[in-house]
Image: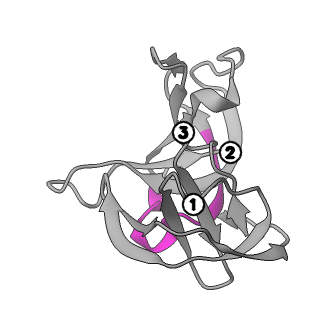
Amino acid sequence: MTVASGLIDRSTAIVQDPTAAIMLRLGGEVGRFSHGEAVEVVGTRSTKSGMLTLRVSAPPRRLGSSPEPAPRRIATGNAGEALEAQLVVARGAITEAARRSSSGSVTFDIDDGSGELRVHLPAALRAERTGLASGAWVEVIGALGQQTSGGQPGSGYRIWP
C-alpha cells in the first residue's frame, strides 16, 4: 500500500506491507505515487530528520492496487521506532489549541494519559483549526513519522493524517 506523494510533502511517499513500512524520498525522475498503489521500488537506505528512509531514484515497478492496511491502535505515549512509517490510529485530548504555521500546516498535541503525541496536518490537507481546542478529544489515523535531530534519536514522533 502506498500513501500518495504530496500528502506529507511533494517529494515523499510511504509504502507499507504486512511486515513493515518505510518513507520514500522521491527524486524528480521517479514521478508521483497514488494512494493504494502497489509498487516495487529500489533505492538507497538513508535517514531524514531521524527517520529511516529509502532514497528512490528510478521509476517504480507498478504492480496494481492494494487495499489499505488496518491502522494499528497505539497509546499516544507509545509512538516509537518499531512503528515508524506505519499506519496508526491514536485517540487523546488536545493539550493546547492547534497552531497554524506560516507554511499553512496545522499542528497540535494529543494525550490519552500515556504521554503526548504531535499531530501534523500538512498544508496540502488545507485543514482548519476550528474545533481543535484544548481539551477536545480526537481520534487521528495516519502514518507515524519522526522529525528530530541526531542528538535526540528517540523523540519527535508525530502522526501525519
Q: What residue type is labelled 2?
A: Val
In this view, 76 is above or below 42: above
The residue labelled by disc 3 is: 119
- The single residue placed furthest to the bottom in the displayed view is 19
* Magenta segment boundaries in residue numbering: 77-92
Q: Which amino acid does label 3 sit on?
A: Val
The crowding category of the residue bearing disc 2, from other C-alpha atoms within 10 Å (few below 14, some 14 to 19, many at least 20), is some
In which quarter of the view is residue 80 placed?
bottom left
The residue labelled by disc 1 is: 30
The disc, 1 or 3, on the residue closer to the chain's N-terminal end is 1
Q: Which of marks 1 and 3 is in front?
A: 1
Taking the image as drawn, is residue 13 in sight?
yes
Q: Which secondary structure, mark 2?
A: strand
Q: Which secondary structure, mark 1?
A: loop
Does the magenta run of residues contain 62?
A: no
Q: Nearer the viewer, residue 36 or 79?
A: 36
Separation of residues labelled 3 and 2 (CA atoms): 8 Å
The crowding category of the residue bearing disc 3, from other C-alpha atoms within 10 Å (few below 14, some 14 to 19, many at least 20), is many
Write the residue at 64% across / 60% down: 88
Q: Are the residues flagged by discs 3 and 2 in contact, CB closer than 8 Å? A: yes
Write the residue at 64% across / 30% down: 124
Separation of residues labelled 2 and 1 (CA atoms): 30 Å
Residue 75 place in picture, x, y as percent? 56, 58
Q: Which secondary structure, mark 3?
A: strand
Q: Nearer the viewer, mark 2 or mark 1?
A: 1
In this view, 45 is above or below 105: below
The crowding category of the residue bearing disc 1, from other C-alpha atoms within 10 Å (few below 14, some 14 to 19, many at least 20), is some
In this view, 24 is above or below 135: below
Write the residue at 60% across / 25% down: 135
The residue labelled by disc 2 is: 140
